[in-house]
Image (cartoon, rainbow, N blue to C red):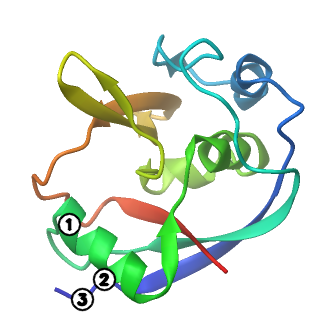
Amino acid sequence: MEIPSSEAINIVLDPRVSIEKQITLGNYKTTHAEINSKNFSLTIPAGKREVILYEPHGYVTTEQVANRIATDGCKAATLDDALTIGVQYPERQLKNPLVFFGTTWNVGGRSLIPILDHWDNDRVLEMDELSNTPWSSDYRFVAVCK
């Protein structure tokens, strides 16, 4: 399955802005209640970085996407990136749900990952289970390449 990179986005990270403040600035209709400073830390230093969106053509598994990202010498983007994109590019997630499997939160035997998504035209910041269940071609997988 081909999984080419399809789009680059330049962001400016600022870990001095708390998770809660970034959620407020993101102005989401709903946010997963467990995304907070108690459960997560911002770990990426302040500065500019480019993130790449990988576009599957057809259904792909998490493993296939992870392998493609690693083959390109990249790594999956994190919650830091998700929060920043949500603030700096709020309309982007209305085109495609954006998946950030560089951050996982393990609870109740499940690994959850952040996703910038939309329901109708409402923007949401959610967590979904990281599994090897195929993802549809609607999703974009966000990575950081150096």
Check disc 2 and report the residue beneath it.
3
Q: In which quarter of the image is the N terminus?
A: bottom left
* Residue corresponding to mark 3: 2
Q: Do the residues labelled 3 and 2 touch (CB within 8 Å)?
A: yes
Residue found 20% across the figure and 28% down from its top: 110
Q: Residue at x 48, y 10 (%)?
A: 33
Of labels 1 and 2, the one closer to you: 1
Q: Where is residue 2 in the image (x, y as percent from the top left)?
A: 24, 89
Give whichever of 29, 128 is nearer the camera.
128
Disc 1 on helix, strand or loop? helix
Q: Residue at x 54, y 57 (%)?
A: 77
The residue depicted at 51 percent of the width and 30 percent of the height is 125
- Relative depth, front residue between 43 and 51: 43
Mark 3 neighbour density, 10 Å: few (under 14) some (14–19) many (20 or more): few
**Residue 38 screen position, x and y as percent:** 60, 11
Query: In the figure, is residue 146 to the left or right of 98?
Result: right
Left or right? Give the position of 64 relative to 40: left
Question: Where 89 sits versus 57, above or below?
Answer: above
CA separation in Å, label 3 and label 2: 4 Å
Please state, as top left, top right, bottom left or bottom right, where the C terminus lies in the image: bottom right
Viewer-closest of 56 and 105 = 105
In the image, residue 109 lies at what x, y percent? 17, 23
Residue receiving disc 1 = 63
Q: What residue type is labelled 3?
A: Glu
